[in-house]
Image (cartoon, rainbow, N blue to C red):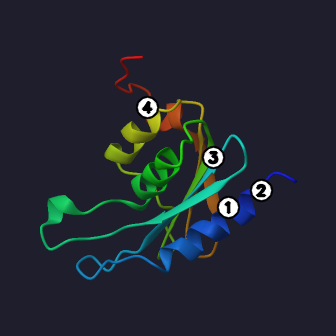
């Protein structure tokens, strides 16, 4: 099995974006998380009328992976509508940091163009206990 390409991971994030439930912001986001054993977990944002109950696509993907016993992540791709690169919010960065700061983060736009950073670059002062 060959490792998933960045392009394929971004495409998975763009496809996940199509499932987003975003009636309030109309800002659809998809994420695709690649684990160390090359399994991909996708997620989309799910909004709620009680805005604090909304969850981001990145956390959906992470929680799906963790609930399946996966804790070692290589790369996460995040894609949204529009021409701008979609950056994870601080809460999502902190959740990802729990599992390692060397995770690659691909931030894409709806055309599949992207920029890459490490989690450590995006969250240099992550809160960590272990």
Question: Which secondary structure lies at badge 2?
Answer: loop
Disc on res. 75: 3
Please indicate whether residue 48 sits to the left or right of residue 57 in the image.
Answer: left
Extreme-left residue of the structure: 50
Rounded to the nearest angstrom, the CA distance separating label 2 from label 3 is 10 Å
Which is nearer the N-term, disc 1 or disc 4? 1
Q: Which residue is mark 2?
A: 4
User: Where's residue 44, x and y in %?
Assistant: 44, 68
Question: Which secondary structure lies at badge 3?
Answer: strand
The answer to whether the residues at label 2 and label 1 have Cβ atoms under 8 Å apart is: yes
Q: Which residue is mark 1?
A: 9
4 or 111: nearer the viewer: 4
The answer to whether the residues at label 3 and label 1 have Cβ atoms under 8 Å apart is: yes
User: Where's residue 113, x and y in %?
Assistant: 65, 66
Q: How many C-alpha atoms fall within 10 Å of the one at disc 4: few (<14), some, or many (≥20)? A: some
Which quadrant does the C terminus fall into? top left
Q: Which residue is mark 4?
A: 98
For residue 103, which quarter of the picture?
A: top right
Q: Residue at x 63, y 68 (%)?
A: 12
């Amino acid at each position: 099995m060959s490792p998933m390409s960045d392009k394929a991971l971004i495409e998975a994030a763009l496809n996940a974006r199509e499932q987003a439930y975003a009636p309030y912001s109309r800002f659809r986001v998809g994420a695709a998380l690649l684990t160390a054993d090359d399994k991909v977990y996708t997620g989309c944002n799910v909004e709620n009328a009680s805005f604090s109950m909304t969850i981001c696509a990145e956390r959906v993907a992470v929680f799906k992976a963790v609930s399946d016993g996966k804790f070692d992540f290589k790369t996460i791709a995040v894609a949204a509508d529009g021409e701008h690169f979609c950056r994870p919010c601080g809460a999502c960065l902190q959740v990802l940091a729990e599992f390692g700061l060397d995770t690659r983060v691909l931030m894409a736009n709806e055309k599949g163009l992207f920029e890459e950073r490490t989690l450590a670059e995006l969250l240099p002062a992550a809160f960590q206990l272990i």
